[in-house]
Image (tube, rainbow, N blue to C red):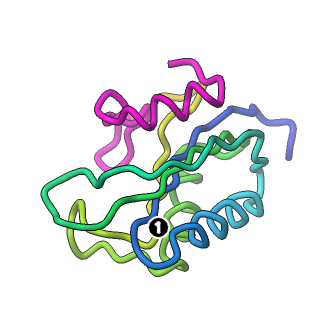
Amino acid sequence: MTDTMIDVAYVALGSNLGDRDAYLSRARAAIAALPGVRIVGTSSIEETAPLGPVAQGPFLNQMVALETSLAPRELLVHLQSIETREGRRRDERWGPRTLDLDIVQFDEQTVNEPDLHVPHPEIAKRDFWRRELAELGARQ
């Protein structure tokens, strides 16, 4: 990494299609391989009921803590690329997915753009995210 500012970002990983464990494993490896990113913590993996109006199977969820020199937008572009490589389709809002990667928090950054909100506005509605953040020692 460069001498630029290093933030700790928290990224939620979720999968409810196919080999959910394998999707999470490949996502962790792909995130770890990103330039300007180092994984410094991983939460436990937990199974949760799906959220939203679409009937679908349960999710496996996990949170990773990253030291990163990337800006939130740059990180989002990389995460969406990983999702696409893993077969993520965006046909139906709240629908089932092979892989879902969400930026939940960035220690020193706040973003409020149409397609990127940091901290993630759904934190208060997702007990499992709050448990995972606490497990990683994140400020909430």
| Residue in the foreground of this view, choosing between 125 and 120 | 125
The residue depicted at 32 percent of the width and 27 percent of the height is 124
Q: Quadrant of residue 63?
A: top right
Location of residue 82 with respect to 134 vertically, above or below: below
75 w.r.t. 121: above or below: below
For the point 45% across and 79% down, the residue is 18
Which residue is drawn at the image coordinates 44% and 73% (left, top)?
A: 98
**Position of residue 83 measured from the top left corner of the image (x, y, whole percent):** 50, 70
- Please provide the residue range marked out in magenta: 112-140
* Relative horizontal placement of residue 75, taking residue 113 as reference (left or right): right
Q: Which residue, as the protein is rendered here, is positioned at the far top?
A: 139
Residue, x 69% and y 32% (percent of image)?
7
User: Residue 101's spot in the image, x, y percent?
Assistant: 49, 56
Q: Position of residue 117 (x, y in %)?
A: 38, 39
Q: Position of residue 108 (x, y in %)?
A: 60, 24
Amino acid carrying mark 1 in the image? Leu
Depth order, front residue of 77/26: 26
The residue to which callout 1 is attached is 99
Q: 77 above or below 22? A: above
- Displayed quadrant of residue 58: bottom left
Q: 20 or 81, which lies in front?
A: 20
Q: Say left or right for 36 vs 88.
A: right
For label 1, count other residues whose C-alpha is less than 10 Å away and answer few (under 14), some (14-19) or many (20+).
many
User: Does the magenta-highlighted stretch encompass residue 100?
Assistant: no
Secondary structure category for the residue under label 1? loop
In the image, taking residue 9 as reference, residue 80 lies left or right, namely left
